[in-house]
Image (spheres, rainbow, N blue to C red):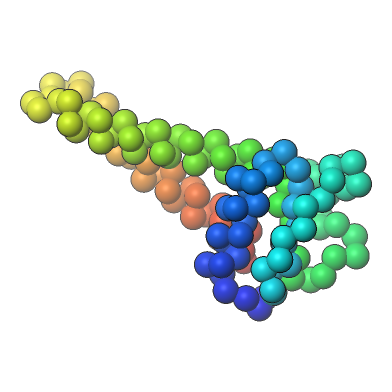
Amino acid sequence: MVGNPIANAALIVSQTLASPLSASAINLSNARPTALALSTVPASTVAGTSPPSGSAVDTGFISPTFKMVFIAVLVVTISCGIAELVLASVWEKPTTNQQAAFEAMGFAWKAGLGAILGLLGGKVA
């Protein structure tokens, strides 16, 4: 694959947030997005099993399912990060249960960050 992986990852994120309910194809060699109408894409392609027919080797296909999973993980990660910051500022001397809740929020945003990097890494590679 030719191209900058960071730029490709940024393009995948922007396409995911711009049109979460439609399939997209990205030419990873020159980082150009192409939105695909769901009605013109075969069902097996939308499920993410194969890229659109006639596509270049360096084309990254982003299914609506991937986009929705990515957005869900992103929302949970950001929510848990914000919750941890709020809990840290509200609880000056936390009880044992409060400390456990705080640590759970910390684990959740860290795991979410790992999941985001894994999802993007899987699409860019």
Residue at image position (55%, 60%) is 10
* 108 w.r.t. 90: above or below: below
- Looking at this view, is 91 or 10 the one in front? 10
Quarter residue 77 falls in = top left
Residue 104 shows up from this direction: no
Residue at image position (90%, 60%) is 53
- Is 8 positioned to the left or the right of 74 in the image? right
- Is 80 positioned to the left or the right of 51 in the image? left
Quarter residue 106 falls in = top left
Residue at image position (37%, 34%) is 80
Q: Position of residue 61 (x, y in %)?
A: 74, 56
Q: Position of residue 118 (x, y in %)?
A: 52, 54
Residue at image position (17%, 26%) is 90
Position of the N terminus, as image quadrant, is bottom right
* 83 w.r.t. 65: above or below: above
Farthest-out residue, front: 18
